[in-house]
Amino acid sequence: MTDIRVSADNPNYADIDGVLYNKAGTALITYPCGRHDLYSVPTGVNSIGQGAFFDCENLTGVYIPMSVTEIQMYAFSGCTALSDVYYGGTVSEWEGITVSLVNDSLTAANLHDNALPLGIASLRVNKTTVVVDDTVIWTVTASDGNGAKQYRFDIYRDGQLIGQGSYNSANTCTYAVTDAGIFSVRVYVKDSIGLTVSRDGGSVTVTDPGAATVATEITGVENSGDTVKAAVRCGEAGSAAIYAARYGSGGRFLGLEVWQLTAGYNEVTVPRGEAIMVRFFVLDENYAPLCAPAEVPIA
C-alpha cells in the first residue's frame, strides 16, 4: 500500500499526503509501507503512534520536527533500511522525547540535529482541472523539492480506481470520458532524490458524454521582453474572462489581472515587472475553467 485516503467527512481521521493522522493532525497513526522514499513528519505533530512505521523496510530516512514529544512502542520496528534521522532541534531536545520500547531501528540510525525538512514538506503542487469537449485534462505544477520532478496520475470514477499511472516527466494527464460519472485524480510528484508528495487533483462531473461543444482556447502566448501576450479564441461572448497571474522567484505571487472577453479573437498584454512566470487561464461567469491554462516562463 502506498497511499491511505480518508473522506473529508470522517470525524476521527484524516490523511495528509496519503499518510493516516488523527483528525486534528497532531498524531501520526499509520505510514503506508509500500512507499520507497524518505519522509518528513509535518510540524505540529506531537505523537508518532504505536506501530506507525512498523515493517516499513524501504524507509531510509525520516525528518522529525521539534513538536514531537513521544514516539510510541513499535513505531519504527522493522525499519531495516532506516539509516538517518533528521531532527529539527538539538541533541539535548531529542533526548527529551519519550521513545518507548522496540524502536531499535530509530535509535540505531544516524541522528542529524538542527535539520530542515527533507523537501517533501515544502514541495508545493498547484493543480488545474479543465474539460475540453469530453476530455478531462489535469495539469500540475510542482515547485521546491530537489531537481527534476516526475509525475504519476491515478484516475478514479465515482470513487473507484479505473486507471493507475506510472512515473514520468509529463505533468499533464488527459482522459477521454465515455460514460457519465464523477471523475477525479490523485497525483503523485517525486523529486530527484525520491521525496514524494501526493495531492487530490480535483474532480469533474460528466452527465452527458458526447454533448459537449467546441471550447474556448488560448491559441498562443508570447514573451516580448517587458511584456507577455496571450491570444484567445472565445466562444463565450459576455460570460468569459481571461486571468493573468504573475509569479516571482520562489513561486511568490505578484498579482492578478483580468480582462472580459468578446466573441472571436482576443489579445491581452501583461507588463512583466518582477515576474519570472505568467500563467493565463480562462473562466466563465461561475469561475469554471473553459480551456487548458498556458504558462510563460520568463528568462
Image (cartoon, helix red, strand yellow):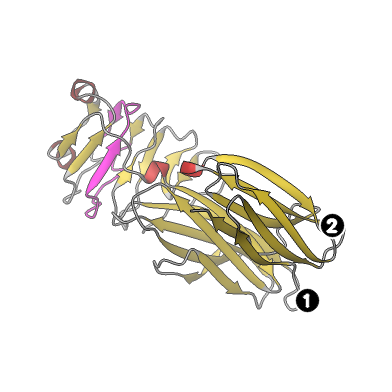
At horizontal 52% and vertical 66% (from top left) the residue drawn is 172
In the displayed structure image, the side of residue 120 where residue 136 appears, left or right: right
Disc 2 to disc 1: CB gap under 8 Å: no
* Residue segment shown in magenta: 49-72
Asked where in the image residue 64 lies, by quadrant, the reply is top left
Residue situated furthest right in the rendering: 238
In the displayed structure image, the side of residue 26 where residue 40 appears, left or right: left
Quickly name the residue at label 2.
Answer: 239
Q: Secondary structure at mark 2?
A: loop
In the displayed structure image, the side of residue 91 where residue 294 appears, left or right: right
The crowd level at tag 1 (other Cα within 10 Å; few <14, some 14-19, many 20+) is few
At horizontal 64% and vertical 75% (from top left) the residue drawn is 177
> In this view of the protein, which residue sits in the foreground, 165 or 145?
145
Q: Secondary structure at mark 1?
A: loop
At horizontal 78% and vertical 74% (from top left) the residue drawn is 213
In the displayed structure image, the side of residue 78 where residue 127 appears, left or right: right
Q: Which secondary structure is most common in the magenta stretch?
A: loop
The crowd level at tag 2 (other Cα within 10 Å; few <14, some 14-19, many 20+) is some
Q: Nearer the viewer, mark 2 or mark 1?
A: 2
Residue situated furthest front in the rendering: 225
Residue 166: x %, y % from top left:
40, 69
Quadrant assignment for the N terminus: bottom left
> In this view of the protein, which residue sits in the foreground, 165 or 295?
295
On residue 222, the disc is none
Q: Amino acid at mark 2?
A: Ser
Residue 275: x %, y % from top left:
56, 45
Asked where in the image residue 255 lies, by quadrant, the reply is top right
At horizontal 57% and vertical 71% (from top left) the residue drawn is 174
Which of the marked residues, 2 or 1, is nearer the chain's N terminus?
1
On residue 211, the disc is 1
Q: How many marks?
A: 2
Distance of label 2 from label 1 (alpha carbons) = 20 Å
